[in-house]
Amino acid sequence: MMQGDSYQRFAAAAFAALVFLWSATSNAKAPFTVDAKVDVMVPMRDGVRLATDIYHPAQDGQPLEGRHPVVLIRTPYGKGNGESSEGKYFASHGYVVVIQDTRGRYRSEGVWHWMTDDGPDGFDCAAWIVQQSWSNGRIGMMGTSYVGGTQHALAMSGSPHLKTVIPVDAVSNMGRQSMRNAGAFEMRFWNWIMLNAGKGSNAAQDEGTAAVLAEMAAQRHAYLKLLPLRYGTTPLKLAPEYEAWLIEAMRHGANDAFWDQNNIVDHPARYSDIPVYLVGGWYDSWAGNTTANYTALSSRLKSDVYLIMGPWIHGAQGAHSHGQVTFGKEAAIADPLGWRRLWFDHYLKGEVNEVGREAPFRSKVRIFVMGTGDGRKGEQGRLNHGGYWRDEQEWPPARAVPTKHYFAAEGRLSTEAPSTMVNAAASTSFTFDPRDPAPTIGGSISSGNDILLQGAWDQRGGPHVWNWPKPIPLSARNDILVFQTEPLPNDVEVTGEIEVKLWVSSTALDTDFTAKLIDVYPPSADFPGGFDLNIGDGIARARFRDSLSEEKLMEPGKTYPITVKLYPTSNVFKRGHRIRVDISSSNFPRFDVNPNTGEPLAQHRRMETCVNTIYHDDQHPSHILLPIIPQALQP
């Protein structure tokens, strides 16, 4: 079985191959050939020109006459220079496809900034498109991750020309539960900058500078031990716009105007009233924002808003396995471009088709319920966790029953509330040393290349975990509090949004509290040691315990309530399994490590060991709130 970045590269290559094969097969049947024009320089309002490729449907070697609907893709990852599979596919089916390098990336002019230019630039690009002789004025957008973020940016720009979007695993709500996660910083963005500052950037145009930045990227494990980043102290200074953004992003914890771009949850009224198809995965880094966006937009827009959530990692809707787990081949969307075309055919061409009638468009909400597999070793030795697709009427499901599972002494997790007589003054304390943070093993991650494992993994170390290389379970660490149920007498389905409510104190002025939900498999012939499967996780930085927009340090020794929001999920904990919650104060390098000193964010010079306490008595009933489906629905 491939591990870490090797698997990620394999998955990406497999998906690209699938796109190519489907494109080749479909283009054999497609009504048109394709004519591509490369590096059309489209002017923005400030005179900066953005490099743009245009794919036209063609016949007899000539672009098809007339006006056509347009598929727009705006990307920081390189537009393809006439070789885009997406461009060729949609053009062969009667669309003009416009693919544009975003500002300051690859062949476009200007200076890169994280997302702040993509609203105005997208607006100007759309206005340019509708003025062209080949455009009928109807624009749809597609793309994943940052490319999904450019869709949200244009949808919030006020453009009258955008008619529909399909944002997949898309950048949004960056100060809420994504880039800043309850005040903590998600280190995948540190990794993104370290990798992209010397690739496709203005700095990378100089070969010598590109080589220095590539050397820096190759030494990321070493740089992780040298945080926080400071101006002018690393080779990142050679790409100043990237250095400046990263330092400010790591220092800016509050969810305020700094993170305003693509803030859909706080500003849903800014979003154009257009059909939206939100695509996400339970193990995707934007999962919590994808479901939150659905809740915000479906209640405001008159247009159709759809949501699909699969058991996927970032951008891997065409795959059914990741990490050490398989979910069954039915978990994959086998036609990565065809289902998008059905959506565009319906909303851009006005065709009556599967949208609103057949899967994956039969219901406004479609989810993959994980966990109904046989638990045996499947392909490549992966755990067969399995699951099935189910249509829902809303998100989260209204029939789910919020059920408190209380933390108790001796690591017990129970639906029985704490009793004064049994649990009087009950609490559990642990020492948190920021110099030895609890390591990350899987989870809802993107841009993890080399430093983070994506997706579903047994919570046990090994050579695949660079900062926990020995085969020792995380539960053995003394800085991780393990609370778990007895073996379940019946299957329990957990589907919805999940929170952990803690009452805590600390010897520090500021610290973090993390939570992780785990499906504990019992020992079996295939997995003699059992399997501790991560389902979802979260974090809360104590200084943001009362508000995501305002910092307030702790008073050492004082008890405070604090909420840790986990990522959403849908999982069946089978009979004989245990439901487990791990509580700690770090999860690195998924999140930056709190130095416990109370110094300004990402500007500390010191680290201090602290003692953190979780209370679980009748006055402080710390618990996880699980949305339980009363009766599991099978397909």
Image: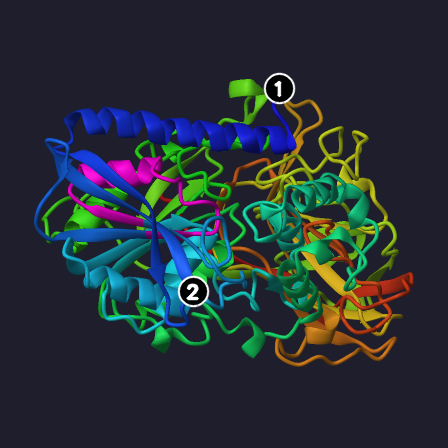
- Element type at mark 1: loop
Q: Which label belongs to residue 44? A: none
Provide the residue span drawn in magenta. Answer: 73-98
Q: Is mark 2 in CB contact (under 8 Å) with mark 1?
A: no
Q: Residue at x 83, y 44 (%)?
A: 477
The quadrant of the image that shows the C terminus is: top left
Image x and y of residue 278, in percent: 36, 55
- Category of crowding for the residue at label 1, using alpha-carbon neighbours closer than 10 angstroms: few (below 14), some (14–19), many (at least 20): few
Q: Which residue is drawn at 76% across and 41% down?
A: 219
Q: In this view, does 428 lie to the left or right of 628?
A: right
All told, the count of numbered labels is 2
- Amino acid carrying label 2: it is Val
Query: Between tags 2 and 1, which lies in front?
Result: 2
Give the residue number, with chain letter if any, for mark 2: 48
Image x and y of residue 18, in percent: 37, 28
Q: Residue at x 76, y 55 (%)?
A: 586
Give the residue number, with chain letter if any, for mark 1: 526
With respect to residue 162, does 1 lie above or below? above
- Element type at mark 2: loop
Q: Distance between the residues labelled 2 and 1?
A: 59 Å
The quadrant of the image that shows the N terminus is: top right
Q: Can residue 279 be seen from the camera position used here?
A: no
- Category of crowding for the residue at label 2, using alpha-carbon neighbours closer than 10 angstroms: few (below 14), some (14–19), many (at least 20): some
210 or 121: which is nearer to us? 210
Image x and y of residue 561, in percent: 70, 74
Q: Does the magenta stretch include residue 95?
A: yes
With respect to residue 352, does 152 lie above or below? below
Rendering quarter of residue 181: bottom right
368 or 186: which is nearer to us? 186
- Amino acid carrying label 1: it is Asp
